[in-house]
Amino acid sequence: MILLCGIPSETPLRLVTDRIESAGARYVMLNQREFSNCDIWFEIDEAGIRGELRIGKDIYSLDDFCAAYQRLMDDRCLPELEAELPDSVLRRRCRAFHDTLTRWLEISPARVVNRCVPMGSNSSKPYQTQIIREQGFRVPETLITNDPALVREFAALHGRVIYKSISAVRSIVQTLDANDFDRLEQIRWCPTQFQAFVDGTNLRVHTIGGEVYATAISTDATDYRYAARQCGDPADLREVDLSPELAQKCLALSRALGLEFAGIDLKVTPDDEVYCFEVNPCPAFSYYEKNANQPISEGVARCLMAA
Amino acid sequence: MFLVLCSSNDHAARWAFDGLAQLGIAPIELITSEDLAYSRFWEHRVGVAPSSIRIGLPDGRTISSSCVTGVLNRLLSAPQELVNCAQPADRDYATQELSSFYLSWLRALPGTVINRPTPQGFCGRWRHASEWSFLARRAGLPAPSYKQTVDDQPEHGFHSFAPQGAQVESVIVLRGRVFGSSLPEETLAACSRFADLAESEILGIDLFRASDGRWNFSTATPYPELTLGGQPLLAHLANVFTHGEKQ
């Protein structure tokens, strides 16, 4: 049986649920917004790991789950807690429920898409970039510094330079321009990440269960996710085939990061050099599925059902 | 160059620094988290060339990764001093940015780094009691059962398994060798397997004596009290540094 966790109406989770349902596979939906009506416990002893999950009146043995797909949002931000005081009983129960669930998922013998620990590499982009580089990908030249003189030198060497957050906090990638040079002194308080701009076509590659789905994204925007805002037109997405070598390299990268499911951001230069920028360990793939007719949700469902 | 990275109040790291220097590990530099907080400049590069870090410390020293061959890494967190410089509304973001930066530059340190940083801890991976318990069983180290329910607060998963009043012994495993206590051979072998499964070059393990006389797993840390290992631990650490990467 497959355990699906998150908010059922959230598009990626809904798509995977639909595929599993169409295939006739058995699944249980854990709607995290209904946490107050759920319960979970687990125990590790001589016999191994055992426990139970209760959703409403239904009780499931944790042993019965051979696979799990988690799309849990930060439980502290659930709408059901909006009016709750920071230390309310409901808030504490919500946290304890989610903590117990995720602790079990970390050690469960089930196939978990994805566990939290491997997702951690994405908490630091340059940390993850070092792993990506070790897997044989080209990575963009990156400088993290609090020294404005080094930034000027870097920009003089590379021409177009972008800057973005170091952490997983979402930031809109921006091109370093004349106005930014005027305020460079501000970086003295916090080292900031600068990167040589790589010209080329963006590729988003999703890897799941040994399958690879590649989408090319055409846009003039610095950050294609914000193409409409940055250059007036939304990005154009289309399905593409990767060379077998590149496909294998993407699968190997996902494995190296310990991820069952990954969204890999690549760029192919006019000289056919492939750069890897980042690996998203919890890809919201529906944007690519919808705009490039990529059957990614089927791949996720197949991976879960094969466990 | 060898580095000891630690907080200024980490007496165990200072003890290791002095001991390593006496054993001839040279040149060796002690760099505190407070030094790092007030660094004159940072230069961290990732790209085609091997990743690098250059730090201009407030006392005039410059640390360059190209000169580093070994590191005893005892850093716990990014400097709060810098975070406090941010506007209150930006402090969470500043903490995340600085933590992410530290994780990356620590990973860029070459040579033997004990322990290498992980997203779950700068000086090695901190684990939840459920994970420690799971690993202990895999390593053949007896451990009490661990149970978690929604009635338990999350802190529950970070407590020691030792019952109150139990006799507790601490050991330190460094690259497979166990220091600090003369426990039965089979317990020491299990501790070594445990550290290996935990993928930790150095790991402190607490064990307690159960009513049946067997030594049971209590808790573990990638930030052990080094002095418990005494001179034998220091000598092994010096040997590991001298002989470089994985043996």
Image: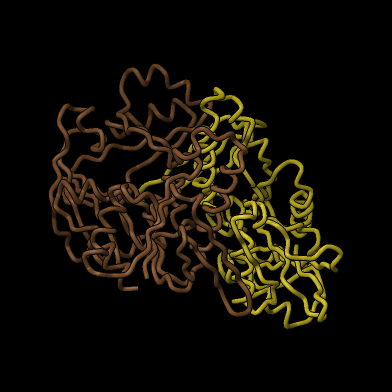
Instruction: Tell me the brown chain.
Output: A
* Residue at 52% over, 47% down: B103
Quarter of the image with the N terminus of chain A in it: bottom left
Viewer-nearest residue: A258 or B116: A258
Residue found at the far front of this picture: A57
* Residue at 32% over, 69% down: A26
> In the picture shown, does residue A13 fall above or below B209?
above
* Residue at 66% over, 40% down: B33
> In the picture shown, does residue A10 fall above or below A295?
above
Coordinates of residue B51 in the picture (x, y in percent): 44, 49
Viewer-nearest residue: A17 or B61: A17
* Residue at 79% over, 70% down: B208
Quarter of the image with the C terminus of chain A in it: bottom left
Viewer-nearest residue: B54 or B181: B181
Report how many numbered discs are placed on residues in the image: 0
Query: Can you see residue B242?
Result: no
Q: Determine the image quadrant of residue A137.
A: bottom left
Viewer-nearest residue: A269 or B132: B132
- Left or right, A212 with reference to B236: left
- Left or right, A83 with reference to B149: left
> In the picture shown, does residue B138 fall above or below B55?
below
Coordinates of residue A275 in the picture (x, y in percent): 27, 49
Instruction: Tell me the yellow chain.
Output: B
> In the picture shown, does residue A277 fall above or below A243?
above
Coordinates of residue A51 in the picture (x, y in percent): 54, 69
- Left or right, A172 with reference to B175: left
Query: Can you see residue B203?
Result: yes
Coordinates of residue B177 in the picture (x, y in percent): 69, 73
